[in-house]
Amino acid sequence: MKRSALFVALLLATTACSKPAGTDTTTQAKAKATASGIDTAGIDTSVKPGDDFDQYANGAWRAKTTIPADRASTGVFLDVFNIAERRNAQVIGDAAKANAAAGSDQRRIADFYNAFLDTDAIEQRGLAPIKPELAAIAAISDKTVLAKMLGSDLRADVDPLNASNFHTEHLFGLFVTQDFTHPDTEVPYLLQGGLGMPERDYYLSAKPEMAKIRTAYVAYLTRIFTLAGMSDPAARAQRVMALETKIATAHLDNISSQDPEKANNPWARADFAKKAPGLDWAAFFGAAGLGGQQTFIVWQPAATAGLAKLVASEPLAAWQDWLTFHHINAVTSVLPKAFDQASFEFNGHTLSGTPAQRPRDKRGIAAVNAYLGDAVGQIYAKRFFPASSKADIQGMVKNILAAFDTRVAALDWMAPATKAEARRKIATMRVGIGYPESWRDYSALEIKADDPVGNIQRARLAEYHHQLGKLGKAPDKGEWWMTPQTVNAVNLPLQNALNFPAAILEAPFYDPHRDAAANYGAIGAVIGHEISHSFDNTGALFDATGKLRNWWTPADFAHFKQQGAALVAQYDAYEALPGLHVNGRQTLGENIADVAGLTAAYEAYHASLGGKPAPVIGGMTGDQRLFLAYAQNWRAKERDAALRSGIATDGHAPARFRAQTVRNLDAWYPAFKVQPGQKLYLAPDKRVHVW
């Protein structure tokens, strides 16, 4: 479950979930759940499981559930997120009361949070905290100075295997990890960026809903320039929109950006001037602190060349307007209310359909977690994640890994050589449970109680320097990309590793007091999902060391791709809104992980019974409880705007279609007496197993 420097409470892609969902109904749901671990009150018995398993498992819940005004969606994931948020509030509140010594992490937490909440002081300062930056942008005199400004803005962002585009204030994004083909060395990956909207289709699509969003974006640009007191704000907005449209045209699409083989483009420093002329790369890299770096991997070479060309071809005034907007846009949350509200109206309301902004205190909690995540996480893990839970989850992981290994060993279509490589990946997979083995050192990060803008900027810069500090060194295979208080999980193909933060290991995902079938159907399927990402259409391209290497026989890989194509077709057929279908190719990796992960969880559950029959609880068999727990993991209700945004940008299918994954497992059919002619029924030879 991504990230991401952009990892806040939840992340995108190569993950078990895609975004926050759910109201705080956990206590209510637990009260209604029986010893079976299933929320029986949420089931819609008027629907046949074989016609719509999601509606059967969750229809009654959905009918009586309202999406909160400050949320784009509601469902189980936000139930669990709200538990973590309340605990984070305790950690931050205690830090604020502690009057801790200057320079301590507790003091940093308190000062960051208090500065974020002091809206009176924020109003009084106005734009003063960023006036020097805006003056520097206005003073840019030529393209070399522009290159230096663009380089000084470079920051380290999320794993591109989890988020392919960098739609931030940076023209490029930087990711530091081991080399694709030399896994003993950390290198910089350069990625496309520069967009203020989520991705290229928002600029280029002819769909009417995208055209409306473009109109709203220009209005937002105009509003920001107006609030900043800039001359001719409408003309500036049009210049930024025109420039970003050209940037979007240069961008590689989402699906192509997911392919690491297309991304493996080593460039020497000298290559940039030849392959991507137009940008003064010496000035850019010098300002970025990369003047001595001689090797890079360029994720999207055509886009890199296109962006460099735009630096040369587009007027300096357009770049100055673009920089001005993005420098303001990056910190609207800690600028006067008019800026903050304008940002929410576009980014929250227009893009996601959310009617109301989240309360300031909760946004402050999210901000502290985003920029001081390990400082909070170290306390969180100690207080809220008992050793007994860690041991229990480790046991489940061991069982699910064993089930996956047993399944691979028994595959009749895979050659012995391919099996050996796959099983080596399983045997050497590094699984982090709860929290990392080492914590981030914030001692060099200055946090001030009266400088919320500077706090965010210095924290971003500190993260960038932390990432640069890894260059040329041996990779830390135990590195975590999520904090313990993150309600998510992630697979890291380059590390052959998994992270399961403490915050997701909560009911209804995991409850040590309930029946094993529900735990295996819920958190077990999440664990299986993350394990399976090592063998999805991206993960399967990396070997046990994290090296990008084809370890498949041609016949085996052809079979694997054939199964993937069948899953693409299955998801392409799902209609999220009238005329709006799921993109099966874009969501393939997550869909493979769902199918394979649920299969592994199911088989691990049966292995855990030790040959004994599963008990019947609440009138439900073990298989029924497991499949229902899985479907209830994905209970969700989402605003149409958020759903459209997800279809356009997210690597995950909408939650309700993920619940229908069960139709690919043979065991689901007898468990719920699913018959031919029912809508979800697939003939045995049409069920996609992949692994």
Image: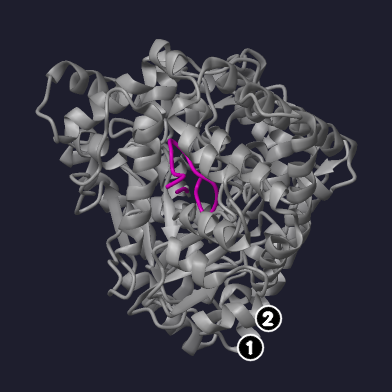
Kindly identify the residue that appears in the image at 13 percent across and 30 percent down: 102
**The furthest residue to the top:** 120
Side (left or right) of 317 relative to 286: right
Q: Secondary structure at mark 2?
A: helix
Position of residue 645 measured from the top left corner of the image (x, y, whole percent): 71, 38
Q: Within the image, what quadrant is residue 689 found in?
A: bottom right
Which region shows up in magenta? 3-16
Residue labelled with disc 2: 558
Q: Picture quarter containing residue 380?
A: top left
Question: Three-letter amino acid code at disc 2?
Answer: Ala
Callout 1, which amino acid?
Pro
Residue 468 appears in view? yes
- Number of labelled discs? 2
Q: Are marks 2 and 1 in contact (CB under 8 Å)?
A: yes
Q: CA distance from mark 2 to mark 1?
A: 6 Å
Q: Is residue 14 magenta?
A: yes
